[in-house]
Amino acid sequence: MTRLRLRKLRRDVWATRARIAMMVVAIAVSILAVGAFLSSRAILGREIERNYLETRPASATLHLPGGAGPAAVAAARAQPGVLDATARGSHVTRVKVDGGPERTLVLFAADPADPQRIATVRVEQGVLPPPVGGLLLERTALAYLGVRPGDSVLVYGADGGTVRVTVAGSVHDGGVAPAEQERTVYGYLSLAGLAALGGSVTPTDLKIVVGDGSGPSGDRATVERTAQRVAAALAARGVSVDRIDVPPPLRHPHQGQMVTVGFVLLAFGLTALLLSSVLVATMLGGMLTAQIRQIGAMKAVGAGTGQILAMYLTLAAFIAVVATALAVAPATLLGRLLAGQGGRLLNLDLGSRAVPAWVYAVEVGAGVGVPLLVALVPLLRGSRITVRAAIDDHGADAGSVGGTRAGRWLGRLRGAGRTQSMALRNMFRRRGRLALTLALLATAGSMFLTGLNTAAGWTALAADGIANRAYDLEIQLNRPVPADTLTGVARKVRGVVTAQAWSRQAITATAPAGVDVARVYPDDAHGSFTLLAPPADTTLIDPPLRAGRWLRPDDRNAVVLNTLVPAQHIPGAAVGDTVTLTVDGRATSWRVVGIISDFGSLATAYVTDREYAQVTGHAGEAGMLRIVTDRHDRQRRQAVLAQVEKALADNDIGIEQNIVIDELRAALDGHVLVLADALIAIAVVMGFVGLLGLASTMTTNVTERTREFAVMRAIGATNPAVRGVVTTEGVLIAALSIVLAVLAALPMTKVFGDFIGTRAFAQTLPMQFSGQALLLWTVVALAGAAAATSLAARRAAGLTVREALTTL
């Protein structure tokens, strides 16, 4: 490129420095969004896997009711495909701090001689296992309970009494979710310490790692075959195995939630890249428009098409390179910040926040490659323009709206003043540019609305899960008791309006051969499968039906499944199918009569109390109590719960877990918080990118109509009038884009909600169109349009007649 053309480029950059800066910022913001989303997704995806695998999770856990002694461990290790084995103990109870509410406590116990090669934790304070009388808490439980190492807590023993235990330190367990999110405390102690709380001194959980020379296996079928082989070998030695737990191999309990969040970040990151492309096309096309007459002049003195194209491509490359260079570092920083927030919400240690090289490659490719590719279209068209066409350019498409029937109709609109009429006509001068601008703003608006609508759908799903529960308290017992006794004790408590006893039992889908295999994780919650038998006339739940019907009192062998059962335990189960469930140690056949949405519950099968009694032989016994209180505020519920628990303890009825409906709502909100926050943050970025595009368009429109504004000023137009025409045009474009955004957001919300809802919770999200989101976007779009066009409007109003007429 000659020195003369380089000098022209330098002068062009300086003369249009405000517009160049706007283009750089617009491209940089888009690349910032893409880079941040991809960086955080890559970091979280890598770190959630690393955190979980560092715990060296067991591939399977075999439950041995007679105890897993050294001989059983040795027999398991001797089986082909078993890399290692160990024996552990576990127990579910409750814990509280003096004067505080009770919380569910899951205890994991190990022998001091355990080499800790399987299901390990990282000790942050103290030693593992702690001395008898002490326990280590998972680190997130400290803030949840409001305690520190050295404090004491009250742990409920098997007899219903409390034992004061010292918090001997803390650990990080990469295999469990934060305590506050799950409303569950995880504790770690010795087998002797567990025995002091009423648990078994003999470990009953035999944990094995399945794999080969390359490491642990991630194939479920391989794990299950090997676990069944171990169970058969133990049975041959007279050791019974009543259940095998095989959680999804090498997958964190919240891996599905993380995959969904990652998908959202990736989808919106790609959308931001699409917006960036449209924005580049709009802004570079506008830049070229401002140079049309100069191109004509250069061609008139001998410049060739290739020379002009090379000159403007150099300018486009300069803008793209500067924008990308400015965006890469902030994108990495923002991505790390987003990953850090996600890590806190998922209880991850981000050992490394390094961003993979492929993310930088995508950023550079998007920031430099996409603008140049998109720029080729307007630059080729502009560089090929003839001298006559360039000099004759007057800032409007051939046959533009001004001289058409539509233009005359717009000019005669009743109620529209001169300013509004001119703004309407000017909108359609460059129909291609108007289409690009509308596409940009409407895409940004539709993604903004879709993001907030989807977040509202998550909130509505959690709200529906609570609304479908017409009770205030749930108390799960550690052993079945007569239902009449249970309800009689509860109804005597002041503040109890209704008390219902439900039968409850952990179940599995019956294995065709061998020992039943459950999908539950070691926390005994994620992946669990429960059978509930409510009274026939219960009104305490009203679950929405997805298919079929609810139970009837006269049903025989009928079962209703919630949506998690077909997704996790009985793939493809549908209304009319016959399923086989192991209940109370026996295989039983049931006909599926309904599928329900039961958000807030884990995988659950519902049968009538009569059928439950007939199958199990435990007529009139219950394992759970659900209560309606006289008032429904948090304080009253907690007060009634304390009185009910005292009454049950006085009658030697042991409690395993209690759930207050407020606590359940907080737990449900915690599960969707990560995704909702991501959607809201992305929506804000989309809106900003769209408004930058509008600002660019209006600046271009003003530039190419410079002489027109001179004529307006020459015939008496005032500065406010000129500003009004430009600003009104921008606001009208924004208003039209809002309509298009709403029309696009409706199907997008449905499709997006169905997809990620099914992926995360095996059910679609309620279709929600947030009026607040629409109002917010309307205000942002209209006010942003006015602000975005203010600079162009001031420039138009500030032009003198002489400046305008001498502009080339």
Image (tube, rainbow, N blue to C red):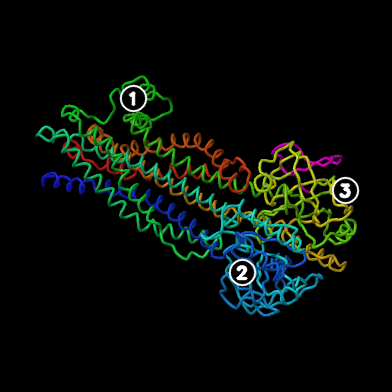
Give the mark nearer the N terminus: 1 vs 2: 2
496 on left or right of 768: right
Give the mark nearer the N terminus: 1 vs 3: 1
Kindly identify which residue carries mark 1: 401
Real-space CA distance between mark 1 and mark 2, rounded to the nearest whole angstrom: 69 Å
Q: Residues within 10 Å of mark 1 (few under 14, many from 20)?
A: many
Comparing labels 2 and 3, the label whose residue is closer to the camera: 3
Magenta span contains residue 54 = no
79 on left or right of 793: right
Measuring from the top left, give residue 164's x and y in whole percent.
73, 77
Kindly identify which residue carries mark 3: 614
Q: State the residue in front, 47 or 167.
A: 47
Q: Residue at x 62, y 48 (%)?
A: 761
Labels 2 and 3 touching (C-beta < 8 A) = no
Measuring from the top left, give residue 184's x and y in whole percent.
67, 63
Kindly identify which residue carries mark 2: 138
Measuring from the top left, give residue 498's x and y in whole percent.
84, 53
Q: Which residues are magenta?
A: 540-560
Measuring from the top left, give residue 189's x and y in whole percent.
67, 74
The residue under label 3 is which amino acid type?
A: Gln
Q: Main secondary structure of the magenta part?
A: loop
The residue under label 1 is which amino acid type?
A: Val
